Image (spheres, helix red, strand yellow):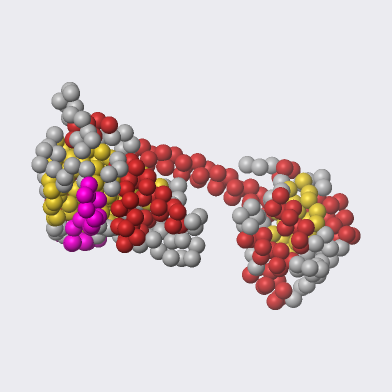
Amino acid sequence: MKKLSDCRVLLVDDTKVNLDILVEGLKSDHKLSLALNGETALQIAARTPPDLVLLDIVMPGLDGYEVCRRLRQMPETADVPIMFLSSLEEVQNKTRGFEVGANDYLTKPFEMLEVKARVRSLLKAKAYNDAVKEHMAGELRVAREIQMGMVPRDFAAVEAAYRVGFGAVLEPAREVGGDLYGICTADPERLVIFLGDVSGKGIPASMFMVRAITLARLLARQTVEPERILARLNDELAADNPSCMFVTFLCAVFEPRSRRFILANAGHCWPALLPAHGAPRWVGKNLGTALGLEPGLTFQRAELALGEGDAVIFYTDGVTEAFNPQEALYGSERLLADVTAFAGQPAPAITAGILRQVRGFAAGAPQSDDIAILTLKVGGGRADPSGQEPRA
């Protein structure tokens, strides 16, 4: 936790006498920065973010209310405590001060002992909050590493055994998220693919998704049909779901010998088929119901025969629901049009190309949702010379 003597206090007052009094009373306890007007205060705060701001209200140019409002808008000072020191003592003045973001309000003339006590109290609270945030950030970093460790990244063994190519990306909107994908080598003639999106974001969504994907991998080794995998997974999730969370989920089975592709959908975005020759189109018609809300649901399947060079693109709604600065939506039709440019490319290039298109459309706008993209492409793999089943 940061020492109070290392904390920097920014003093803002257009009257030099007031600044002199504050400096004399605080200089032995804290580091100080001084400003005689609002514009200078904002420049100093941006250059050397303080740990606390003592702010006058009535000043030429920008008044204290406006300075406080702008400090709250600056990333460097959004959470810095601000205390008004003002001769304005009416209730409406104090109320306005708190409305624009102040943490404390003290009227002039003030007692220096009271100022020092309030300064210490605000700085201790900030130091404690900073320590908590740092601790939480460390735990979130570990949670992210655990989540990222659950998704496959090296597909070489699977690609060789099943004569396919894979390209995948997972980018949570926060440190951790509710999107996840998985691959299960159920047997030499059956490759099971998962992709899902839990309601909400952050650690609760991540924990629910970990549970869903772990159960799905177990069920995939016991159950052949993807629609039955979803039905059993739904019953398991709905049986113990006190938080009433749900997950949209895709489960697909690819049979490498026949190149048959079987898909079941539980309320998720339809995958896109990118043929080696021809226009892209959606896979499946039945949207289905999300998992975890109620037991006893049934799901339908869609089947198609994939050809050499065909690709199936799985994605979450963080792709189609990406917004640009004008708040326009990327959308499903734009996605289907954009993937045409990647026909004939390897699976990793298709995935990277889609992400690049989404990022280009967003043009720097904040990512509004988790993004997961998984591309399966038929062909390009080599038979496993050992003849052994790979693990995924």
> Where the C terminus falls, by quadrant?
top left
Q: Which residue of the protein is positioned furthest toward the top in this rendering?
A: 386
Where residue 199 sits: x, y (%)? 34, 58
Magenta stretch: helix, strand or loop mostly: loop
Where residue 85 sits: x, y (%)? 77, 64
Residue 249 can be seen, yes or no: no
> Where the N terminus falls, by quadrant?
top right
Camera-side residue of 192 and 294: 192
Q: Residue at x 77, y 46 (%)?
A: 31
Camera-side residue of 139 and 392: 392
Tell me if 134 is positioned left or right of 17 in this view. left
Camera-side residue of 242 and 387: 387
Magenta stretch contains residue 285: yes
Count of marks overlaid on the render = 0
Tell me if 294 is positioned left or right of 317 in this view. left
Magenta stretch contains residue 260: no
